[in-house]
Image (cartoon, rainbow, N blue to C red):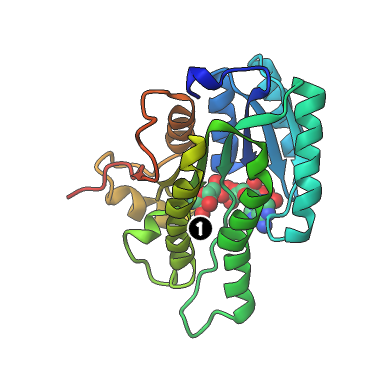
Amino acid sequence: MPSEYNNSTNANVAIVIGANRGLGRSTALALAERGVDLIITFRSNRAEAKDLVKMIATLGQKAVAFHLDIGAVDTFLRFAKKVQEALRDHWGAERFCYLVNNTGHVAVGPTAGLTEADFEGLSDVHLKGVFLLTQHLRPLIADGGRIINVSSGLTRFTALGMAASGPMKGALETLTYHMAKELGPRDVTAGTTATDFGSGIIGDNPEMQKDSASITALGRTGQTDDIGKMIAALLVSDADRWVNAPRIEVPGSVKP
Ligand SMILES: NC(=O)c1ccc[n+]([C@@H]2O[C@H](COP(=O)([O-])OP(=O)(O)OC[C@H]3O[C@@H](n4cnc5c(N)ncnc54)[C@H](OP(=O)(O)O)[C@@H]3O)[C@@H](O)[C@H]2O)c1
């Protein structure tokens, strides 16, 4: 956050959407380690979110957790009001600095096998949800703030079964360019981080882990902290203010 925007109106707070586990959790913890307070969201697992709030407190930072389903756009107005109240009640502020749109899932299958509901579910979460949630939150984002949308290596390479999931992230990256243009006059930067770090569908499957590890120069699959710490560094560093609307690949150095 540029120093000219450090004032009592703006809380040094990041909102991480979908933070109870995975990459979102790692990002939230890495931000807390860098002195940022958090508003985190969870969809189905309140207990994980509560644990994360406690962990953030042990790192010396304040955090609150709210429920949010990014597919339920009719709840966004209420969510934005809760954020506004939390900023006032917990930080005595009106705006927050950083937004990480992290939620996502994949629908795996051949083009012929996926249903309209699969397609709409992906587009609701990866595109419509991000668009409308950011629209609702943008009055609460501080001038000089940042938005990071989490993308995927699937916009760079192909994988069988990902013909519906990949293009959603492609659209998200295009949306990010337009967000950056629109918010530029407020000195708010927007960017995507894209990763194929290898959890998600690979999960604990040893064969898939082996395959994934074999195409990285480091010879291992990525871990959530490989990505979360990178996102946190991008958000709080003033050194990369000119890095606006980029697609930052965090691929684990794929072999040439
Ligand atoms: N994992 C990978 O290898 C990989 C690769 C490339 C890109 N990415 C991207 O990285 C991001 C995070 O992935 P991840 O692997 O960390 O995922 P993850 O471990 O599956 O965690 C996803 C998080 O998003 C939440 N979420 C899912 N759908 C939601 C919805 N409709 N509304 C609100 N929250 C929702 C989940 O909540 P619940 O606990 O309730 O499900 C969870 O907190 C995603 O955008 C993904 O596309 C991941």
| Along the viewing direction, whichever of 94 and 207 lies nearer the viewer | 94
Let me know if residue 189 appears in the view.
Answer: no
| Along the viewing direction, whichever of 96 and 172 lies nearer the viewer | 96
The answer to whether the beta carbon of the residue marked 1 is less than 8 Å from any atom of ligand 1 is yes
Q: Relative to 190, is 87 above or below?
A: above
| Along the viewing direction, whichever of 143 and 74 lies nearer the viewer | 143
Count of labels in the image: 1
Label 1 secondary element: loop
- Left/right placement of residue 37 relative to residue 110 reads right
Q: Give the quarter of the image for residue 46.
A: top right
Crowding at mark 1 (Cα within 10 Å: few <14, some 14-19, many 20+)? few
Q: Position of residue 16 (x, y in %)?
A: 62, 39
Amino acid type, label 1: Ile
Residue sitting at x 36%, y 42%: 250
Q: Give the quarter of the image for residue 140.
A: top right
Residue sitting at x 61%, y 72%: 120
Q: Position of residue 108 (x, y in %)?
A: 51, 69
Q: Position of residue 34 (x, y in %)?
A: 53, 19
Outermost residue on the top side: it is 60
- Left/right placement of residue 154 relative to residue 255 reads right
Outermost residue on the bottom side: it is 112
Mark 1 — residue? Answer: 201
Outermost residue on the left side: it is 256
